Amino acid sequence: MIKTIMRHEWRSLLLDRTLWFITTLFALLIGYGASNGSAWVAFQQTALTAAQNEERSRYSQAQAELARIEQGGKASSAFTNPRLPSVAASRAGTRYAILPPSPLASLSVGQSDLYPYYFKVSSQSRQTFLNNEEVENPANLLAGRFDLSFVIIYIFPLLILALSYNLLSAEREQGTLQMILSQPVRLRDYVLGKVLVRTLIILSLTFGFSIAGFLISGGTITTAEGFYRLLLWMGTVGVYGAFWFSLAILVNGAGRSSATNALSLAGLWLLFVLLIPSILNLVVSAIHPVPSRIEMIQATRRASTEATTKGSALMARYLEDHPELVTDREVDPNDFVLRTLAIQAETERLVQPVIDHFDQQTFRQQSLIDRWRFLSPAIVAQSTLNDVAGTSFSRYRHFLRLVEDFHQRWRSHFTPLIVRRVELRATDYENFPVFQFKEESQRGLLRRVLIGLFGLLVPVILTGGFGFRVLRRYSIGG
């Protein structure tokens, strides 16, 4: 019987101009969103390629300069001499730490436009490169980019509600509902058949453009990770759509007019998609305010000034803390390189409490949002889609931890060379530490995604179950 209802509904919808208009508009929007996401990923890849080319060119120049010096030439300047470990560690030999776009990054920009996706790691304090971010238009950062996930979170529900607000009310108002239900068909089956047809139409469009955007941006379904993430993406979109359909069934089951249903569903859309996320953001910011980056920069400057004034005392204490660096030769108290290392270490020690406070507040904000996100299916869906697309805060934190580990390795490699005044050769540049990004464990990703899917399934089951229960008391005659 449900198949018969679906065939009848399909023929009816094909004759409805509203369906054609809405689906065409939706197709254009999701196509534009997918195109925007692909453009952003292409921009990222271009920037990363340029960074890698710059690094290779810089290394080639340094090695050519070293070859010339080894043949009897002189360095153009002591500050740019690639033979000095201090110059190689801070300028000539610095490496890029890169966060590559994930296979589905084009579908959800997420927070990848808020945080830097590459750092130029040197022997200096980590704040010198962690805070050296690109300047972006604040309006763009506030509104977010118009990508496919934006269309799914904000416009996808509106399309569902536009096609479902009058599932029963329109036919009851036209007087045809009684005639339909005079046939051997249950009201529940009739509603389910109508909903399934609409679901197939909408999800076919959404899934089709998701796969197209994935392929256009360079993704491939033949890889295990790409196929795995694409399945999780479509599962999240499907469950999110099911929530809005179940909400439409519940509102239709109340037996109100089409106009009342439309207003009620529009109000619920405003509540779940706009109001709750905005209120939650304000509450989280008020409970755990994050210090501004200006405050962090000012603290760094104050710490640097304070450390510089201490001079030789810092250098003596630095060598006491690092006896493995002490050589047989007498240490010059005016040694500029050693003094710089000591000042950097003291500056980091003084600034560390500010950095820790900043990180703790950011983590507390995210933890509070994760705890209360289930108040809004839109927040749950957005965070889950970001996780699947690899543009979430969790993946960025994982990247930062890898960068910090690499920064420590970089310093550990060069500090002994700097203190012992080793002269580098061209071949030494080939043995410098190299950053390699390793994806976070799939178990952690799957755990977060499954929690998100569970957070969407629960309201679907509750709302849908209550909606079909309300249908039992539906007044056919109005």
Image: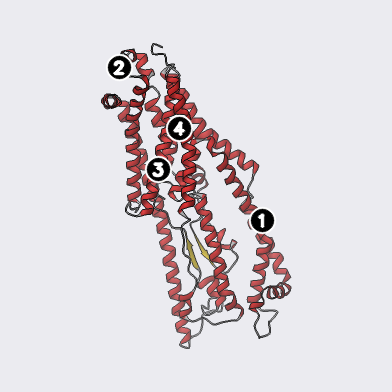
Amino acid at pointer 1? Val
Query: Which mark lies nearer to you, 3 or 2?
Result: 2
Coloring basis for residues: secondary structure
**Callout 1–callout 4 Cβ contact below 8 Å:** no
In the displayed structure, does residue 212 sit left or right of residue 115? left
Q: In the image as oriented, which residue stretches furthest toward the top?
A: 477
- Give whichever of discs 2 and 1 has the lower sequence position: 2
- Residue situated in front as seen by the camera: 388 or 187: 187
Amino acid at pointer 2? Pro
- Residue at 41% of width from left, 54% of height from top? 43
Q: In the image as oriented, which residue stretches furthest toward the bottom?
A: 72
Amino acid at pointer 3? Leu
Q: Which image quadrant: the C terminus?
A: top left
What residue did someone put label 3 on? Answer: 148
What residue did someone put label 4 on? Answer: 460
Residue 225: x percent and y percent? Answer: 39, 53
SS at mark 1 in the image: helix
What residue did someone put label 1 on? Answer: 354
- Residue at 40% of width from left, 45% of height from top? 232
Q: Quadrant of residue 471?
A: top left
- Is 195 above or below relative to 216? above
